Image (cartoon, rainbow, N blue to C red):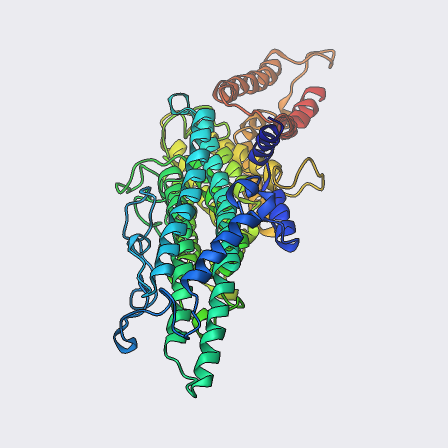
Amino acid sequence: SAASGTKAASAAERAEETASKTRDRLQEALQNRDLMKNIGEYEEYLPLSTRVVRELRAIFECLGGMPSNGTNFLLVRPTTPMQNLPPPEPSLPPGGKVLRTEKVGSGHYTNLTMQQLKTGYPHLDAYGEARKSVAFASVDGYCRQLRNARKKLLPSAGGSSAAAQAQNVDSAARDAVRCIEHAMVVVSGEKSVYRAVIAPSSSTNMARDTEHEESEGNQDDPHLPQYRRALVASYSYVVSAAVDRLLDLIEYTFMREAAAANIGSSLNMDASGNAASGGAGANNSTGAEMDIRAAASAAAAGLRVVDGVRMLGPSLSKLCELSGLPGIGPSAASDPTVASALCISLHRSTVKNCSKTLENLARSIQLDPLDGPRHRPVDARVATVSSDVVHAIRVISPFVSAYKSVSKRRALPWDPNIGENAGEMDSFVRFLIKQLSISLSGKAQNYKNDEGPDSQAKSHLFMMNNTFYLLELLAPNGVFDGSAEENYRINAPWFKQKMTKSFESEKAKYLKYWEVLGRHLTDVDDRELNYQNNKDVLSLGSGRLLKSRFSGFIEDFERVYVVHRNFTVIDPKLREMLQGDIRDVFLSRYKAFFDK
């Protein structure tokens, strides 16, 4: 019970683990060579007791042994003549690139791992088939265990809300990274089995073969290279089953959980490489409305998986190799194998699918509808799209290195460069802000197209509300208010300059609607004023002239008030600022006119 409590605590901690803490933990584990014991299932999935190792090694020594007459005792040499012996199977397809042949979620990525092992050495075939089933079952069982636990915590019946869906996608990505860690445990265990059981007996037998051939004057036994290739093929056959299951799980996470396959079409880009103005109502009939928060959660989940593959993939690939082990020559160890090709496909597939989730996020902003009370508020308050984009930027911002890993290897619509010339996370954030600006401008234009006296003013106030909101939440403010991941700020000068310029321009236009109040507050020429006999009391006509000025001011104020009273400014700082600016438009002139 104590062990299970420790595991539960560990799982709960990892469910809340931030991206930076995950990277620090994995980096420390890789540096200390202690990743395997870091998982929690190390003892369960690496059961190498000394007695079992000795017994297995004795069996292989017997199968590969040599009696006193110098002939091989059972199964080391194949009965087929060397010149007729085919290379070990399964082998890589032409070109060495492994492609998906099985259905996503089936538990397999390619049918190469389901073919029968044929090395020409029956005892190695038996070893490969036996250990392959163990390796596959270890990874498959762990994947199912995590998925069942996730379903219990996030039941589908009550998980239709955006928050529940985001939590489910994030949990699936975290589980995918845990499965990468677990696959390393399994592959490391299989390498330990190989090192403890097969490698010593194979190296001993090869030494005997070499001594026997030297005594007969023949040092070029053609069976030795073939046997070394068979050893590599048998080990690759075992560990490729684990990597194959992991690859299917990660693609399932992208395709089903993160909906990477649901992109209607590519981003609409104009001839200069900029995103065309979009919106569900603007010449767009290619796809349905896409939820920005869901797309943001999927993009963050994809970057989290890339982060795990980026950090653990090289170590997993290294574990799938046999270089440096006894009995394996350098030429045999360097031969491409199914396992090594699957490790390459793992990284390639992760980068490709993550790029789709990033495109999905950008496209969801581009497709945000320009009309409707949810997307274009009737009171000109902050639009939902603005808060959604702020949320999106904050959830992807912790994965700067993961984004760079994607942009270096894949041309993106907003960043066609690859390699060292590829852009950083800032280029993607800038593109998202640009898409948001296009969407806000389209909504503001639709306000102007509405009928009514408030349409123009509402358009300007809408832009003020949104640009001020973006400045408050994303522009650098010099105050550290929490973790950097939760309070991401765009420190590049372009953002503050762009938003401030837009805000000041819209504010100037909005205040012009209050300047109408000053047209009745102009100075009255003393020559137009007539007084009664005592020179202190205005004549009836002059009194009516001043009264008409005040009446005109009051009527204009009431008309402006009726138009603007239905507008909403939620931010108290902006509301106080606007109240002061509006007072400055007419109050000083009113006081001067009144006092005179």
Residue drawn 58% across the image and 29% down it: 4
Q: Residue furthest bottom?
A: 217
Query: How far across and how far down the image is residue 159, in percent?
Result: 41, 24
Residue 215 versus residue 243 in the image, above or below:
below
Residue 316 versus residue 571 in the image, above or below:
below
Query: Does residue 444 appear in the picture of this structure?
Result: no
Residue drawn 27% across the image and 71% down it: 80
Residue drawn 62% across the image and 14% down it: 543
Give 382 or 461, whichever is nearer the viewer.
382
Looking at the rendering, in which quadrant would you find the C terminus?
A: top right
User: Based on the displayed image, in which of its 4 quarters is residue 591 positioned?
Assistant: top right
Give 223 or 139, whichever is nearer the viewer.
223
Give 354 or 116, whichever is nearer the viewer.
116
Residue 19 versus residue 411 in the image, above or below:
above
> In the visual, does 125 lie left or right of 595?
left
> In the visual, does 364 lie left or right of 116?
right
Query: How far across and how far down the image is residue 17, in percent?
Result: 59, 37
Give 73 or 363, whichever is nearer the viewer.
73
